[in-house]
Amino acid sequence: MELLRAAIATLAESGYAGASLRKVAQRAGFTTGAVTYYFANKEAMIAAVVEHLWDEYDAHLESIAGLGLNRRLRSWIAMNANSDIVEAQFQLLAQAKHEPLLAEIYERRYARYRKRMAERILDQQRTGDIRSDIPADLLADHISAMADGWSMMLHVEPKRFAPRRLSALLVGLDKLFEP
Amino acid sequence: MELLRAAIATLAESGYAGASLRKVAQRAGFTTGAVTYYFANKEAMIAAVVEHLWDEYDAHLESIAGLGLNRRLRSWIAMNANSDIVEAQFQLLAQAKHEPLLAEIYERRYARYRKRMAERILDQQRTGDIRSDIPADLLADHISAMADGWSMMLHVEPKRFAPRRLSALLVGLDKLFEP
Amino acid sequence: MELLRAAIATLAESGYAGASLRKVAQRAGFTTGAVTYYFANKEAMIAAVVEHLWDEYDAHLESIAGLGLNRRLRSWIAMNANSDIVEAQFQLLAQAKHEPLLAEIYERRYARYRKRMAERILDQQRTGDIRSDIPADLLADHISAMADGWSMMLHVEPKRFAPRRLSALLVGLDKLFEP
Amino acid sequence: MELLRAAIATLAESGYAGASLRKVAQRAGFTTGAVTYYFANKEAMIAAVVEHLWDEYDAHLESIAGLGLNRRLRSWIAMNANSDIVEAQFQLLAQAKHEPLLAEIYERRYARYRKRMAERILDQQRTGDIRSDIPADLLADHISAMADGWSMMLHVEPKRFAPRRLSALLVGLDKLFEP
DNA sequence: GATGAATGAGCTTTCATTCAT
DNA sequence: AATGAATGAAAGCTCATTCAT
């Protein structure tokens, strides 16, 4: 829906504290009343946004599932830079710790996300693309933590992700995880 | 100062959006007016909090500088679980993207923090405790990203950091970084 | 609108410094939020009040345009005494020097007001009711300054405007301006 | 005293609504506490300021008492433009209507001021410099009203007081009041 | 004689929410 | 299906005032 997209853009642009219903509605071309017409209240809208974000996130990851780790990371970084998805996710995650409803959603979907990643890594361990001396679920945890950390810093320390530096980081990663 | 401590606790408890001057003042046993007496405005208070947080964070890292990577990570995770420092940092970092003043502070102090970590890793590469086929500054980046990612998820997915699981993760880490 | 009327009454009663949105809203039977619903902010409300005041002021002057100078002044003084218009104007004028937006409105409307007055005086110069040895625009300036001065003092020195004294002042005025 | 001077300058610069004790104290190089040390409260300070302003105003008028009407007005206009006295007076007068203590002071000193002006005009009527067909006290009222009106508009409509226009206005005035 | 810490009331403004239409 | 008027609570902030030192 239009409103969800507007909410994501607003979250990415203004942060959670700055994402008022007013702003969201205005960006979508509605009045504030419309938002509370479609959603019971703000919390409900935010919850819908989170689910929607995860759907989009999962879809993107699915679309690059066949690629190698390095390629996947590059594609993921491109999404970070060019879409509001990850930034909005980050803002909502920061809020999730103080809203049980959000926390529940994140716990559930994050677990599923990491399970899939573990499966993918297991595949690559079988084909010999990734080291096998560490269980796949642990590696999935290591990698997703690193990804979270980078997405967290992307807009605060942009220099850290300049193309050349980024390549070096990914080369390093390859070495860390190669058999 | 009392107010800084109260601000950190409030940030950790209520998040950035919920950390009003009123709440901070009340927790410290002051009235709202006292906060604006000591700080020109909220932005100034937040900036003071950030600097203070980094001072404490740095002090803690300094105190465990001599230990091995594994020990350092364990101590760092203990701090995450038992102190408000990291949670408050996370809340402020989420806001930093939308407040240039904060962003500037984070950029400066984060760079310094990662530089020190790289020096420490270089030491351990020389003593043969850490693999040397990847430059120390890249490894510092990998590790700090992972640390950021974990601190980000600590309160949302507590199960991910149950003692047994945590040990496994750290064993995995050791393997990733050992020569 | 109700709010504009309430604002004018509040300005007249409490002065600019004492005319809070709270008071205005309360007098109009609204909550404070209603004021900021109709006006973007206080400055916008004040600007709307000023334009409204001038509209009413102009309408009154128009309604007495056909009368002689003496009659016009008497009618104008009656308005001063019985309506909040002039007192509110005075309060806002005092503030205009420190708010460019207000200053601009006053400059524009005052110029128009004095231009009309000059036209009226020119008419009376042609009919021989007012002396012609001084240009009409200068006389308009003299008279409007006097009117401003009196409206300024009306509520501070009420004795100065007791009926008998007032008549004497107007007789004097007639002599000053008669051919 | 330093504080009185600072208060006058602040009133002229920021208007009554903007003249906080903070600003006054700061301009005088004191702390806010010092103001309430010297004066019982804000009202008392304002009252002291008003008396001081009148003293200075009277002193200035005394110093030009011997000059002709036209000269006196020119000197008075110069004071308006170059000193804070008249502007501060104006701001306080606007407030006087809502503070009985101020109103009382203004009533008393304004009466005295106009009495002296009437005496001076009487002198000039005797020497034949001013028309005698209107009683001096009425003329004093007419002139002081005009002066009030001009001082009120000086900073709002500066164009109205450009040198050339001003001269024309004063020539007109001379004609109005000449025998 | 003057400061500096602190208060508490009040200010403008923003916001989520309600509800008649 | 959606608007627009209005609310009421809470926010950041300013201010006059108090008082121990």
Image (tube, coloured by chain):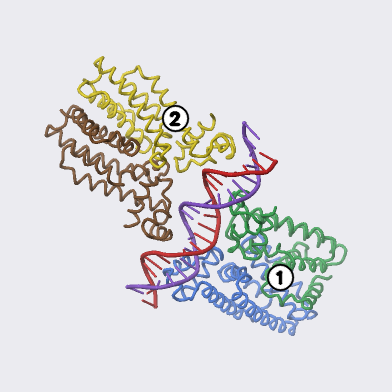
Chain colours: A blue, B green, C brown, D yellow, E purple, F red
Image spot of residue C7 (x, y percent): 36, 52
Amino acid beneath label 2: Leu
In the drawing, does residue B82 fall left or right of residue C16? right
Residue at which label 1 appears: B150
Corner quadrant of residue D95 = top left
In the drawing, does residue D127 fall left or right of residue A154? left
Residue at which label 2 appears: D53
Image spot of residue D26 (x, y percent): 56, 38
Can residue A79 be seen here? The reply is no
Can residue D86 be seen here? The reply is yes
In the drawing, does residue C118 fall left or right of residue B172? left
Residue under the image location 74 percent in, 85 percent down: A126
Amino acid beneath label 1: Trp
Residue that sits furthest to the right in the current view: B127
Residue under the image location 22 percent in, 30 percent down: C168
Image spot of residue D10 (x, y percent): 49, 37
Question: In whole angstroms, how far apart are the C-alphas of marks 1 and 2?
Answer: 68 Å
- Secondary structure at badge 2 equals helix
Image spot of residue C98 (x, y percent): 42, 42
Quarter of the C terminus of chain A within the rendering: bottom right
Which numbered circle lies on residue A31? none
Q: Chain of mark 2?
A: D
Q: Nearer the viewer, residue A52 or C110?
A: C110
Residue under the image location 18 percent in, 36 percent down: C70
How dense is the environment of label 1, judged by Cα within 10 Å: few (below 14), some, or many (20 and up)?
Answer: many
- Secondary structure at badge 1 equals helix
Q: Nearer the viewer, residue A155 or D126?
A: D126
Say yes or no: labels 1 and 2 on the same chain. no
